[in-house]
Image: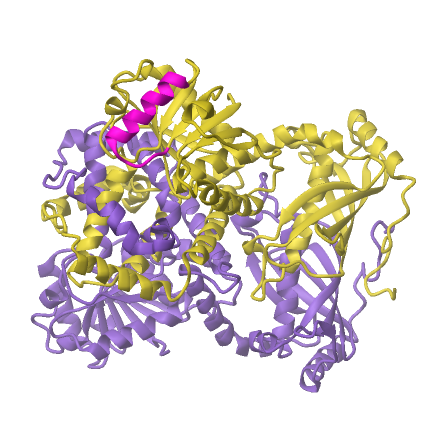
Chain colours: A purple, B yellow
Amino acid sequence: MTSITTAACIGGGVIGGGWIARFLLAGIDVAVFDPHPEASRIVGEVLANAERAYGMLTGAPLPPRGKLTFCTTLEEAVAGADWIQESVPERLDLKRGVLNQIDAAAKPEALIGSSTSGLLPTDLQRDMKFPQRLFVAHPYNPVYLLPLVELVGGEKTSPATITAAMDRLVPIGMKGVHIAKEIEAFVGDRLLEALWREALWLIKDDICTVETLDDVIRYSFGLRWAQMGLFQTYRIAGGEAGMRHFLAQFGPCLAWPWTKLTDVVDLDDEFVEKIGQQSDEQAAGRSIRELERIRDENLVGILQTLKGSDGGKGWGAGKLLKDFEHTLWAAGAGTATALDPSQPLRLVDVKVSPAWVDYNSHMTEHRYLQVFGDTSDALLRLVGVDLAYVEAGHSYYTVETHIRNLGEAKLGQAIHATCQVLSADDKRLHVFHTIHDSISGAVIATGEHLLLHVDSVAGKTVAAPTEILAKIRAITDAHASLPVPEGVGRPVGQKR
Amino acid sequence: MTSITTAACIGGGVIGGGWIARFLLAGIDVAVFDPHPEASRIVGEVLANAERAYGMLTGAPLPPRGKLTFCTTLEEAVAGADWIQESVPERLDLKRGVLNQIDAAAKPEALIGSSTSGLLPTDLQRDMKFPQRLFVAHPYNPVYLLPLVELVGGEKTSPATITAAMDRLVPIGMKGVHIAKEIEAFVGDRLLEALWREALWLIKDDICTVETLDDVIRYSFGLRWAQMGLFQTYRIAGGEAGMRHFLAQFGPCLAWPWTKLTDVVDLDDEFVEKIGQQSDEQAAGRSIRELERIRDENLVGILQTLKGSDGGKGWGAGKLLKDFEHTLWAAGAGTATALDPSQPLRLVDVKVSPAWVDYNSHMTEHRYLQVFGDTSDALLRLVGVDLAYVEAGHSYYTVETHIRNLGEAKLGQAIHATCQVLSADDKRLHVFHTIHDSISGAVIATGEHLLLHVDSVAGKTVAAPTEILAKIRAITDAHASLPVPEGVGRPVGQKR
């Protein structure tokens, strides 16, 4: 896995802005060139959405955000970049001109990706001096949350370029998929166009409204496709006999055929207005910003659900998120040294996610324990009890917990948790966590926890190894001079 | 909202079995007629999957399961049913014959739905004596989890029939969508066919494999479609200018066009085998049962995520699930009287969901508090603190919690929680919950909680109203003679 050091983005609209956010939030510096007078505002808005989403998406620490520079020339932006992403409007002549300019100014070994959603890389690279490094890297909106990138090479693209591009997408949490042959619109937009054309006919012919059509998708196969796509879903539908049976059973339908194969609907003014009106009714007064917010929260929740799938191993886009978090944790491991050991350790920083709140936007009771559990996990990683250690058969288990709810955390609120180690011996670890509001510092809840070191295979308590005990000891000693927090050692209901 | 009292299902395959499960799990008796020798086994398997999924899906109590009867004649099955669902193979002559037979034997006021995925209701009802009650009710697999039902009337179908059908789907957790005009394949399968045809070409032409194609869907627009469908998604993509802008920008692409409009791929043996082999590789040795299990767990998780969306109000299929749970709670409210008041109250029965476990399939720490929180909520509903009460501005808040983890709950394990009320006054409620393994009864964890009655608008503690206090008092008095549970009043770390 190789990381990009410096990226350049030529074009900073919704798609370019999404790329910029992906790079910056993964700690990569980005130089931007976009002559549009509002480029900086648009990029700023996409970036704000992305930061909000990432704050909910991952429990892993984000690296320090990369440096964002707006350049006045394309040449200035691409100089020194090792990944250059072109996201200018979808016209062959325009893209060719921009790519030729990039080609002339970039380092010879730089990778050059085009965000085109339909043009052929062979056409794009025609006049380049080093065409072997040009490829299509077609992402999906919102780029900061949807992981897919279709990678397509042209006739002159080298196989090494595709391999290198695939590799460099991993540390920014994206999923490169190599499309074996170049065709216009690649794979995703082919599928979307087919469905889109049919959808427009259904509206044109008054079979249903846009709201009904969306409901048909999102109450049925949309739920399937978030996790399995088309063929794997049909494999299951075929029952024990699988895919071959399904094709035998449902293949003939295609020959009837139902859909309007040969026609393309005419998007005249009247029809555009019809769809526009139905779409307004469906939105029921919600602004685009509001819908974006809901969409992103749903995407975050769906991705997190898939992360926990298949017995915790992760599935599809959730597996990818899990891998991304591992990358973040590994990168973040070094930052722990910055903690002041003589103070309670600030181990978790998080924003209250929409999946965490009840009907009136208060954080649900059990999410407090989730934050405390994450705090314990962060402490354990700090002393060497990481995923590898746990998978090798030992861990610390929480056996007792005392929570005091002193305030309330609300949707979107920035909170953080600190940890004071009260005492420890070779098996026991006694800690006191505090959840604070990150702006005022006010205490929202406290958690006192007793953890025991266990052999999880044998299912019994055992002494922890000396190297871990030494690290725990160092923290315990540093915390020995701290006052005992108010609330320690209290049973439920004791008068204050 | 009107409930079905007795349902009949003619045909018990994967789709018929899904309908049977929907009815039974909503407490409705079902009579089945299917001459297939293995009908009973197939229905049993679908039902087992459905029960497993429902156990994870909803925290609300399921009603006692309806009675399932296999009949030896169609006439016996439909006699007395007020909803009859036909799910026999997709041949017009066969379906017509079955529907005419149903027509002759059913109560005149019975509703008759056909599961056909493409035939026209006008054709189906042609020879019926009471054709006004025949409609298409087209569901999606798995029927027990995907809520959509396309409702389509024929020329002779009465509008009242569609209204009645729509109404009766609500108490079984389904979403009826009325398709305004009948066309072959309705809306969902039109869209699916368009995409499916294009997908087959992409495989045939070796543009990509079935696995790549599925990845393209599930790492990108599949994640969008689970929540918003097509038009609402594009409305957002159009930015502040919305749908009209999107159409102006992307409409022209349709005229190029990219997709293979006029051709239908030939599903010859060689091509079927090619897809079959690629599908085998994609499955990587996972059986259909295993894929079904993963699919259902993912669907449960996605539905639950959407239930918490939009600030807890629920979104799309998640909003529907929330409404369904309200129905279940309302129906279950009467069952609380069956509790023995002199014993700890068994208030929660649940199976450990895949979203609740860590990498080694143990229930995650904070999910214990989720179960305890659900137990407190159930107790509160029992004494009159229900959703309406909370929404009116008063509630009980947990202010202190003490948890002891004495064992471990694992994926799929049936657990239940009991509640003993320790003490109460006009503001305070002190309870002790215990999580048990439902088979052995062994104690897995205990939770001691102090709750305060609050005015949630004013944000302060206030006395609860007398009618609620009276109900709490009745339970407290009944529990007064129970021994104080071991573990009450202990601080963290006290030696046992």
Q: Position of residue B267 (x, y in %)?
A: 17, 53
Q: Position of residue A25 (x, y in %)?
A: 42, 65
Rendering quarter of residue A73: bottom left
Q: Position of residue A141 (x, y in %)?
A: 31, 53
Whether residue B316 is visible: no
Q: Which residues are magenta?
A: B87-105
Q: Relative to A373, is A244 on the left or the right?
A: left
The number of callouts visible is 0
Whether residue A119 is visible: yes
Q: Residue at x 72, y 32 (%)?
A: B336
> In which quadrant of the rendered image does the N terminus of chain A lie?
bottom left
Q: Is residue A320 above or below residue A292?
A: below
Q: Residue at x 40, y 60 (%)?
A: A317
Q: Residue at x 81, y 67 (%)?
A: A484
Q: Position of residue B405 (x, y in %)?
A: 74, 60
Q: Is residue B99 magenta?
A: yes
Q: Is residue A112 magenta?
A: no
Q: What secondary structure predominates along the stretch shown in magenta?
A: helix
